[in-house]
Image: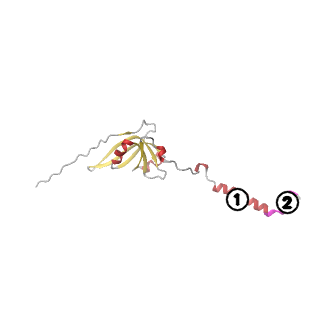
C-alpha cells in the first residue's frame, strides 16, 4: 500500500487532522495578544515619589490641551488663576515641577511637591493651569505669594 492509497482510505481522518491544525494556527493569530500589550501588574505609584516629596493630585483646567503634549509625565510650571475684587489675577506658584498623568485621561495631574510646600499649595483657591517646562530644568522652585488681599472696613453712620 503506497502513501496515496493510505490517505484515500483514511480521508476522513486526514481532513479532521488538517482542520485541527488549521484551527489551532488560526486561534493563535486571533487570541494571542501582542507582546507589547501583555498585562503587567500596575506599578506602585509610591515608587515615583522621592524622599521628602508628596504626589499631590490637582484638577487642572487646561488638561485637554496637555493630552497630546505632556504624555505620561513631564516637567511643568504651575499657575493659579483667581478672581479678586472682580479682577482676574494669574500667579506663578512653582516652576520645574515634575508631573505624573493618570492613565485614564482624568483632569487631575499628580505633581511632585516638596513636603514643606504641600499645605501652602492645598490652601490655594482658584483654577490651576500648567505650562510645559524644559525637562532639564534645575529643580522645583515654589514662588512666594505676591497677591495680598486688603481687608476693607465698612462703617455705618447712625
Left or right: where 33 falls relative to 155: right
Magenta: main secondary structure: helix
Label 1, on which residue?
23
Per the model, the C-alpha gap separating discs 1 and 2 is 24 Å
**Image x and y of residue 19, in percent:** 73, 60
Whether the magenta-drawn stretch holds residue 27 is answered as no
Instruction: Give SS at disc 2.
Output: helix
Sort mark 2 into few (<14), some (14-19) or many (20+) by Cα contacts within 10 Å.
few
Q: Nearer the viewer, residue 86 or 26?
A: 26
Disc 1: CA contacts within 10 A as few (<14), some (14-19) or many (>=20): few
Image quarter hosting the C terminus: bottom left
**Residue drawn 70% across the image and 55% down it:** 25
Q: Which mark is residue 34?
A: none
Using the image as rendered, state which of residue 53 and residue 77 is in the foreground.
53
Q: Position of residue 26 (x, y in %)?
A: 68, 57
Q: Position of residue 130 (x, y in %)?
A: 40, 45
Question: For residue 54, which quarter of the picture?
Answer: top left
Tell me which corner region of the image, top left, top right, bottom left or bottom right, holds residue 15: bottom right
Q: Say whether residue 142 is left or right of residue 2.
A: left
Task: Report which residue position mark 2 lands on.
Answer: 6
Give the residues in magenta.
2-12
Residue at the outermost right position: 1
Amino acid at each position: 500500500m503506497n502513501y496515496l492509497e493510505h490517505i484515500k482510505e483514511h480521508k476522513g481522518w486526514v481532513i479532521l487532522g488538517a482542520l485541527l491544525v488549521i484551527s489551532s494556527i488560526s486561534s493563535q493569530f486571533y487570541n494571542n495578544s501582542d507582546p507589547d500589550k501583555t498585562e503587567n501588574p500596575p506599578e506602585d505609584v509610591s515608587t515615583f515619589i522621592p524622599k521628602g516629596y508628596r504626589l499631590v493630585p490637582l484638577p487642572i483646567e487646561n488638561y485637554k490641551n496637555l493630552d497630546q503634549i505632556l504624555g505620561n509625565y513631564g516637567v511643568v510650571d504651575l499657575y493659579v488663576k483667581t478672581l479678586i475684587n472682580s479682577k482676574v489675577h494669574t500667579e506663578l506658584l512653582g516652576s520645574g515641577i515634575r508631573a505624573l498623568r493618570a492613565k485614564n485621561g482624568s483632569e487631575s495631574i499628580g505633581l511632585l511637591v516638596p513636603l514643606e510646600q504641600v499645605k501652602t499649595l492645598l490652601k490655594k483657591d482658584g483654577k490651576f493651569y500648567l505650562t510645559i517646562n524644559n525637562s532639564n530644568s534645575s529643580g522645583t522652585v515654589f514662588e512666594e505669594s505676591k497677591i495680598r488681599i486688603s481687608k476693607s472696613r465698612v462703617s455705618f453712620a447712625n
